[in-house]
Amino acid sequence: AQTVTQSQPEMSVQEAETVTLSCTYDTSENNYYLFWYKQPPSRQMILVIRQEAYKQQNATENRFSVNFQKAAKSFSLKISDSQLGDTAMYFCAFTVWGGADGLTFGKGTHLIIQP
Amino acid sequence: DVKVTQSSRYLVKRTGEKVFLECVQDMDHENMFWYRQDPGLGLRLIYFSYDVKMKEKGDIPEGYSVSREKKERFSLILESASTNQTSMYLCASSWTSGRSGQYFGPGTRLTVT
């Protein structure tokens, strides 16, 4: 069974700062996908960024980037130039290749961007 | 854009009632999922389906059943609602490989009194 751990229940930073959210996972699989999801107060879950385990290059989407360390089973999310709209719950998630088994989620990090 | 819709945003039911939560996706996705979300517990998988009329139990299937008669529609059924099923229910869908992630609906906040 897979597990995903987010060790930071809540974080708070000032607007325009850079913030890093941590995530570790445990699996015996070699082919899998990792994701970061954002859930704003409106509660619609939105995919932020994804990483395929066989790719060594870290994924980047505008201000969002990941630091994927496969050997350490670590998958952190960096948000640069944080904005008030980044305030949300952030969930790290894992699925094995094939994807039909569903996502395993961490318990989330509540990120607050202060003006 | 992928759209996943759920039949209700808020629902209040009484203990013992049969409850139907409906989910529809418009992207011809093969896979569909039901999760429940509770504070401090994150999201937990209830059931999923990788094809019409196919279903698989997730991590917490007890007290729930599902139905998938059409590819675009996946229903979650609470046969006899109980207060411990008060929660946020999220539906999601994805293509077979899962590499693009799952697309979520807006959620249904169910309260059982």
Image (cartoon, coloured by chain):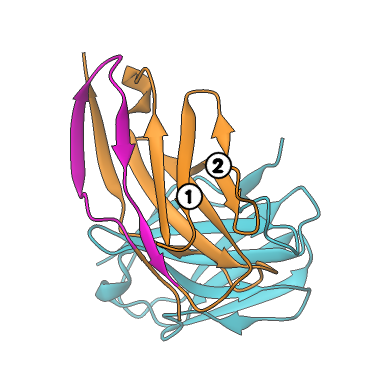
Q: Is residue B30 above or below residue A110?
A: below
Q: Residue at x 33, y 35 (%)?
A: A88
Rendered location of residue A80, percent (x, y):
39, 23
Query: How far is mark 2 from mark 1, CA to CA?
Result: 6 Å
Marks 2/1 same chain: yes
Quadrant in which the C terminus of chain A appears: top left
Rendered residue at 57%/68% (across/down): A102
Q: Position of residue B13 (x, y in %)?
A: 35, 65
Earlier in the chain: of badge 2 and badge 1, it is: 2
Q: Secondary structure at mark 1?
A: strand
Q: Which mark is residue A68?
A: 1
Give the side of residue B96 with respect to residue A92, left or right: right
Q: Nearer the viewer, residue A98 or B20?
A: A98
Residue found farthest to the bottom: B62
Please tell me whether residue A13 belongs to the stretch shown in magenta: yes
Q: Residues within 10 Å of mark 2 (few under 14, many from 20)?
A: some
Please state the total of marks drawn on the protein image.
2
The percent position of residue A26, horizontal first and vertical second, equals 41, 71
Please check the rendered image and state whether residue A103 is part of the magenta-colored stretch, yes or no.
no
Tell me the residue that label 2 is attached to. A58
Q: Give the left or right position of residue A59, taking residue B51 as reference.
A: left
Q: Nearer the viewer, residue A20 or B57?
A: A20
How far across and how far down the image is residue B27, in percent? 77, 48
Chain A on-screen colour: orange
Q: Please provide the residue range marked out in magenta.
A: A5-26
**Which residue is nearer to you in this view: B46 or A6?**
A6
Of the pair B89 and A12, the residue shown nearer to us: A12
Q: Looking at the picture, which amino acid does disc 1 mark? A: Phe
- Quarter of the image for the N terminus of chain A: give it: bottom left
Cβ atoms at labels 2 and 1 below 8 Å apart: yes
Name which residue type carries label 2.
Answer: Asn
Chain identifier matching the cyan colour in the rendered picture: B
